[in-house]
Amino acid sequence: MSAGRRLAVALAALALSAFGLWLATRLVWLRTSYQSPLRGALTVQSTGAEVRPELAAVALVAVAAAAAVIATSGWPRRLVGGLVAAAGAWAVWLCLVSMVQPAVAPAPGSGGGAEGSASSAAHPPADAVVVGLPERTAAPLLGLAAGLVLLAAAIGLVCWANTMPRLGSRYAAPGTVQREPDRDSQWWNALDAGEDPTLSRPPMDPGAPR
């Protein structure tokens, strides 16, 4: 794999993980049923931003890391890879804990849903009582997958730190011909400065044509 492709793969992995983590926070993670004396049966939906708001911060870390990878190289890029690895491992841990530990129903509060058999309020009304256990969705799997992609990107950054190009640095394109300065213009510049250009003229190669 070429150096340019390695950089493209690393940036794509960072962007994909950031989008996956952000999307996971927008999806519904829990559905909890309540019974309210005034409003009847209610269903409260909890999004990933409510269950695991830390995932949004990890997504921002991935975006910032993409910008840092473009601007750095060598050991600074490896340091970025280490920070990305820590953020990815944290995201994976958060999603695994949410999938394994018992789900906690949102505490009743002042917020409430409309009357009817179902609603999507952020918090149930104060007089609501939980009916059964909260129902999990498959949304945490998206956050888990995004965290694993972020870990893979971190490994690539650490292993390919010196082989990936640094965008914004000055390097000549292949096949670029570097032109030597015009000798006549150098002589005129020397004369304008009050210098004798013949004194600083390099010795002529004996084998060169006269």
Image (cartoon, rainbow, N blue to C red):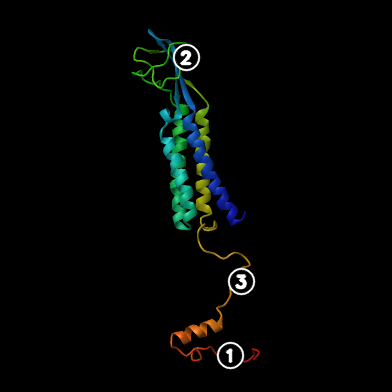
As measured in the structure, the alpha-carbon distance from the residue carrying label 1 to the one carrying label 3 is: 24 Å
Mark 3 highlights which residue? 177
Distance CA(mark 2)–CA(mark 3): 72 Å
List x then y, in percent, for residue 188: 50, 84
Identified at 44% across, 40% down, the residue is 58
Q: Amino acid at mark 1?
A: Met
Q: What residue is pinned by disc 1?
A: 204
Which one is in front, 25 or 194?
194
Q: Amino acid at mark 2?
A: Ala
Instruction: Give SS at disc 1.
Output: loop
Image quadrant where residue 106 sits: top left
Instruction: Count neighbours of disc 3 (C-alpha within 10 A) and say few if under 14, some if 14 to 19, many if 20 or more.
Output: few
Residue at figure coordinates x 57%, y 66% from the top left: 172
Amino acid type for the residue under numbered disc 3: Val
Q: Are marks 2 and 3 in contact (CB under 8 Å)?
A: no
Q: Nearer the viewer, mark 2 or mark 3?
A: 3
Quadrant where the N terminus sits is bottom right
- Per the image, label 3 sits on a secondary structure element best described as loop
The label on residue 118 is 2
Q: Quadrant of the C terminus?
A: bottom right
- From this view, report whether residue 32 is shown above or below residue 3: above
Count of labels in the image? 3
User: Closest to the observer: 119 or 5?
Assistant: 119
